[in-house]
Amino acid sequence: SVGVLPPTIVGHGKMKGTLEVPDDLMPLRRPENELFLDLPGGQKMPQQGIGMCCRATAYDDVLAYRTVLWYLLLGGRHIDGAHLYLNHKAIGKAIAEAIRRGVPREEIFVTTKIFPTHFGYMSTIMNLDKYLFDLGLEYVDLVLLHFPSVPALSSPCKEEGKTPTECRIDTWKALSEMRERGLIKNAGVSNFALKHIHELEEASIANKAPIANNQIQFHPFEPDYVMETVEYCQKHNITITAYSPLGGMMDKDRAMANDVLNKLSSKYERKVSQIMLRWATQRGCAVIPGTGNPDHIKENLSIFGFTLSDDDMNTLNQLKHSAKGFTSMDVRSAA
């Protein structure tokens, strides 16, 4: 019917890929030696999260619910969502069930994002109220501006005749006020180049929220300009969350076949995916690999059980110079 996405996109238990969670499964211990990043508001963000985007099981509300519940009961605590992913209600339902089974809300770190089509002061406030309602939460731990801009699409702010920069600043003003009210704990950005970050740093806003996080595609094959963004952010107390940390959405198979990574996989007796996730965490980043498979969730949560040597970290740091054919999202020219 008109205006309804087909079940192959959002489904309702019509897709396969995530097993039912047993009714008697109770919360397991959090990972031993788990690592965290310090945020400006005093919170600690778990460095191992789960991304709720960009795969079939994230867009079927039944499977999204199962995924988040599995993740929380298996010891994970960092859930990455967004308005764009259309699954706030499923995530919220899973959080409520995990809390019912004994997972403390204060341990759960929830991220969501506002898309540029909703940028603007009043639009941000209204949308954040809806996010809280759909998630069933009294506060969200981190809210990000999803992209700097989407030139081809309109927004309430654009309709007022404002520039992309002004729209981002208006949105940040709203996030800063909601942080003051306790409705969000931290504010951040996603897919921002350094020029976009500098604009927010220089903006004059009363009680301005510090930039707590920049979520970007990040893995060993990213080019130097991405590494420069990471280094600047970390130097200025802006944490980095790495999405697509296994080589990018288009290049995961290429990464999994890389000779260097496979040699390290054999050396440490870990999967290539675990080597890549561990590299990112040792670079001081949070990672949010996406999976609806409980076995893969367990593998991802086990990355704190080993450490890459300095020599092996340096070897992985150099992969970007030798490996070819990897794509990167270059947002430096975005308005």
Image: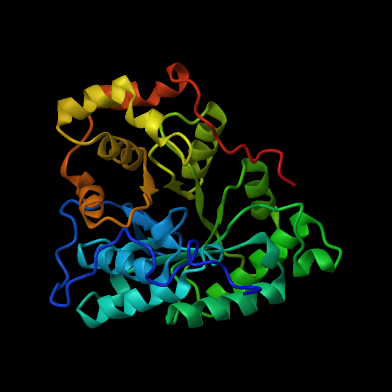
- 39 or 335: nearer the eye? 335
Q: Is residue 141 left or right of residue 194?
A: left
- Residue at the spot 31% in from the left edge and 64% down from the top edge: 67
* Horizontal and vertical percent position of residue 227: 50, 33
User: How is colour applied across the structure in the image?
Assistant: rainbow
Q: Is residue 325 above or below residue 285?
A: above
Q: Quadrant of residue 219?
A: top left
Q: Is residue 34 left or right of residue 188?
A: left
User: Which quadrant is the N terminus positioned in?
Assistant: bottom right
- Residue at the spot 43% in from the left edge and 82% down from the top edge: 136
- 23 or 187: nearer the eye? 23
* Farthest right residue in view: 161
* Horizontal and vertical percent position of residue 287: 37, 48
* Horizontal and vertical percent position of residue 111: 45, 64
Q: Is residue 167 above or below residue 248?
A: below
* Horizontal and vertical percent position of residue 271: 22, 36
- Residue at the spot 29% in from the left edge and 38% down from the top edge: 273
Could one spot residue 78 in this view of the protein? yes
